Every structure is written in structure tokens, then in C-alpha cells.
Amino acid sequence: MKLKSRYNCTVNKEAISQETLKSTQLLLLGGPRMPFTGHELQHIRHYVENGGNAMIIMQEGGEQRLDTNINAFLEQVGISVNSDSVIRKHFYKYLHPKEAFIGNGILNKELVRVAKGEAKQTNAKAGKYAKRYAVNKDDLVERDENGGLKFVYPYGATLNVNRPAVPIISSGPISFPANRPVGAFYVSARRGKLFVLGSMKFFHDDFFEKEDNQKIQESIFKWLLSRDNDAEFENHIREEPEISENQHVPDITALADRLRSCLQESDDLPKDFTTLFNTNLYKFDTDLVPESIDLYKTLGIKHEPLTLIPPQFETPMP
């Protein structure tokens, strides 16, 4: 992984403890695949609340897919990872629908400034960096009039974000679900920082250099590891970001396999249930024989038994 060439990374195979976190500048949990113990979650929370830095990366399907319980910690700071997946509703650049190209998903102008390497502006006006368009044409959707970044969000989930956490990256207006948080951060009272992203493959080598993914990654790590306040995401959240509510969609495929009869109220049944049968639709009887015999008189035809008409065979001449 390209991150190992820039940072001193150590893989911890033991249980997470306070002693382990004391010498750690950044705790990175990339797609945990086992449940954490209650003590481990407490240590992580204590680490962040006392000035530590942590980054948690998930993937599509959330906790159910990875069989973990990291939401038990994240919900304490206002974040939770959903068991869903972000897709792009129509093709653009990337063939797979789950490799969603997002052109209007930045919600924090400080992230854009740090990613572009621009100097700080002292008297800059606050503004939003994700814009909702009424149309869904690529020439409008992929253009960010506020100077945001474009990135590919592969095989990732959405987040639920409430205060004190703040959303910083969204799925944009064209992806489904639209305008949902996919990245969020939290800052504790003692300046501990937590960043949550819903896609592990966002930093994968296959997508690391696609679009502006690398710039966003460098900005996130700069915010987490820098102590000179060069990146201050928390100071640029004055306006409410343009985020849609989480709407649950039923699993149509699963429902189609479990058909049920329609529950509908009906009238009370009569005592003689035979009156419910309509025998005039299909029957086989001799009720029409008298009417057929009367037709002889009406048409003036003699009523007599039918006689056999001898057949005439014609033999072709040779």
C-alpha cells in the first residue's frame, strides 16, 4: 500500500489496550471483521476523547457484511454506518454501478482548500460545497461551481451523522441514495479527532490515483496528523450541509419470493351457500331440445328422421 511509504505503519494483532494506544499517533481501523469487546470500545473512546486521533473505514453492507460492532462506539459520537451500498444511477466513466463517480460531494470548503494546496484566506465567506441540481445531465452534475473536488466512491456505504459529528463528504445528487453522508468527522473537547469513511476501496491502489481521491486522502491525514492547524475542518461548518434524510427501501427481491394473499374484507356468507354458484355460465343438459324442434315449424321444414345420403365416389381416369 502506498501509505506505508509515507508513514510508519504498525499492525496490531493483539487486543486494543490503553498501553497500545499511548504510543500511537493515529489509530486506523480499516474494515474490522470481528466484534470488539466492551473494553476495547471503551479504550478507543477514551483515546479519542483525550486527544487521540482515529480513522475508521468501512465498506458496503456495513456491520452486517463485516460482522463487527463498531457502531456501538460510533453512535456515541453521532455516527453510524448503514448496511447499504452507494451506486450511480447511470453510466459515467466507470463500468460498475458501485464504482460511483461523484462530482458534487464535498461539504466543507476547508477540505477543498487543503486538497488544492491553497493558502489560508482570513476573510473568506462561508459557503456550501455540495450543490443540488434539479436536472440529472452530466454536463451540469459533474461541474461544481464552488470549486469542489471530484472523486470515485467504490463499493461503499452511507452514514448517519448527527451532532456533535459533522458530515464532510456526501454521495452527491446523481448517486443512489442521493445526497447522503459517506464521510464524517468528530472533534472532542481535548482536540481528539475521529474520521469515518464508508469505503475501504476509496484508498485502494486501484482507485487511489483516480480523480481527486489521492488529494482527499492527503487532506484527511493532514488534518488528523498535523498539529500546526494547517487543516481545520471543524472551523468551516457554519452553514448546514445539503443532506437528505435516510429513506428505507424494501427488499423487492426478497418480498417477491414470499407471496401472500391479499387481505380484503367481504360480505357475510348467506345461509344457503349454493346461491353463490352461477350455473348459467357453463352447463350440459337438454333444455334447448324443445326449442330446436319448434324451429322446424317456424322454418317450414318437415320433421322426419335423417336419412343416409349415399356417397358418390369419383375415380380419376388413367
Image (cartoon, rainbow, N blue to C red):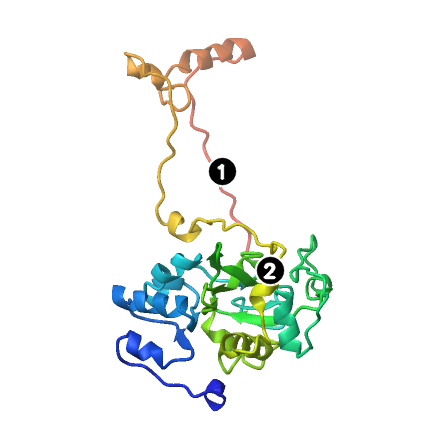
Q: What residue type is labelled 1?
A: Gln
Query: Residue at the spot x=46%, y=15% of the render?
Result: 292
Residue 71 percent coordinates (x, y): 37, 60
* Left or right of 28 on screen, residue 245: right
Give the residue pinned by disc 2: 237
From mark 1 to mark 2, how far is it between C-alphas? 105 Å
Sooner in the amino-acid sequence: mark 1 or mark 2: 2
Q: What element carries label 2?
A: loop
The secondary element bearing badge 1 is classed as: loop
- Quadrant in the rendering for residue 122: bottom right
Relative to 158, residue 255 above or below: above
Tell me the residue at 57%/72% (across/down).
Answer: 152
- Residue 82, visible in the rendered structure: no
Residue at x 54% of width, y 9% of height: 298
The image position of residue 231, as x and y in percent, is 58, 74
| As drawn, 138 above or below 19 | above
Q: Of all residues shown, which one is farthest toward the front? A: 190
Tag 2: residue type?
Answer: Ile
> Which residue corresponds to the image point at 44% horizontal and 65% vertical from the top-left?
60
Q: Quadrant of residue 38?
A: bottom left
Residue located beneath label 1 in the image? 312
